[in-house]
């Protein structure tokens, strides 16, 4: 199966989120930030390599067995992009039409739109646009650790064929 770079990103992003969910269930609080790309994902922060390897493998296995909720993560960076786009769209809708509107009303409309639609829209965008759980060919090929400015950085390589 030949996948585009974006299709590979979507699948790796789903695995990254599943790993983040499993790491978030551990008793110790971990402060981690991850970035997915077409070759896998990079995890910044203090976590043992074995723990990350466990979370990645278990996350992948859980997604493959149908736990697709794990592909969506509430603290994903794409939420911010969707929320910003929503605020901008609301602003354009309300400020269009020539007639001057109260800036307070406009601000209220933006807050209301983002508060009521932001979360479900972000979830939908993550589930349908930014992730993909068709992971039948996915395998974790390597996990490597290096230090960057005193912070551990793990590189998780994933093959999608
Ligand atoms: Zn994400």
Image (spheres, helix red, strand yellow):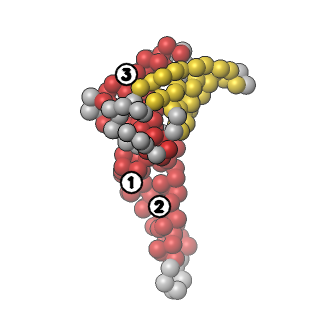
Q: Residues within 10 Å of mark 1 (few under 14, many from 20)?
A: some
Residue 72 rendering spot, x and y as whole percentages: 39, 40
Q: Is residue 76 visible?
A: no
Tell me if label 1 and label 2 are in contact, CB under 8 Å: yes
Residue 79 lies left or right of residue 62; in this view the side is right
**Real-space Cα distance between discs 3 and 1?**
28 Å
Picture residue at 51% right of the left edge, 72% below the top = 92
Q: Residue furthest left?
A: 66
Tell me if label 3 and label 1 are in contact, CB under 8 Å: no
Q: Residues within 10 Å of mark 3 (few under 14, many from 20)?
A: some
Residue 65 lies left or right of residue 79; in this view the side is left
Q: Is residue 71 visible?
A: yes
Look at mark 2 in the image and give the residue it sits on: 86
Determine whether the residue tagged by mark 1 lies in a helix, strand or loop.
Answer: helix
Determine whether the residue tagged by mark 3 lies in a helix, strand or loop.
Answer: helix
Closest to the camera, between mark 3 and mark 2, is: 3
Look at mark 3 in the image and give the residue it sits on: 58
Q: Nearer the viewer, residue 134 or 86?
A: 134
Look at mark 1 in the image and give the residue it sits on: 121
**Real-space Cα distance between discs 1 and 2?**
9 Å
Residue 5 rendering spot, x and y as whole percentages: 50, 44
Q: Nearer the viewer, residue 138 or 36?
A: 138
Closest to the camera, between mark 3 and mark 1, is: 3
**Between discs 1 and 2, the one toward the N terminus:** 2
**Real-space Cα distance between discs 3 and 2?**
34 Å
Q: Is mark 3 within 8 Å of ligand 1?
A: no
């Amino acid at each position: 199966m030949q996948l585009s770079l974006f299709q590979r990103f979507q699948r790796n992003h789903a695995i990254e989120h599943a790993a983040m969910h499993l790491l978030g269930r551990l008793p110790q609080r971990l402060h981690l930030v991850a970035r997915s790309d077409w070759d896998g994902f990079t995890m910044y922060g203090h976590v043992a390599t074995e723990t990350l390897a466990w979370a990645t493998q278990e996350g992948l296995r859980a997604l493959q067995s149908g736990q697709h909720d794990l592909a969506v993560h509430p603290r994903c960076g794409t939420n911010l992009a969707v929320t910003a786009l929503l605020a901008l769209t609301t602003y354009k809708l309300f400020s269009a039409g020539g007639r001057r509107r109260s800036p307070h009303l406009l601000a209220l409309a933006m807050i209301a739109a983002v508060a009521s639609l932001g979360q479900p829209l972000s979830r939908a965008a993550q589930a349908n646009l930014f992730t993909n759980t068709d992971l039948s060919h996915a395998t974790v090929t390597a996990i490597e650790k290096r230090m960057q400015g005193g912070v551990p950085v793990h590189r998780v390589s994933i093959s999608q064929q």
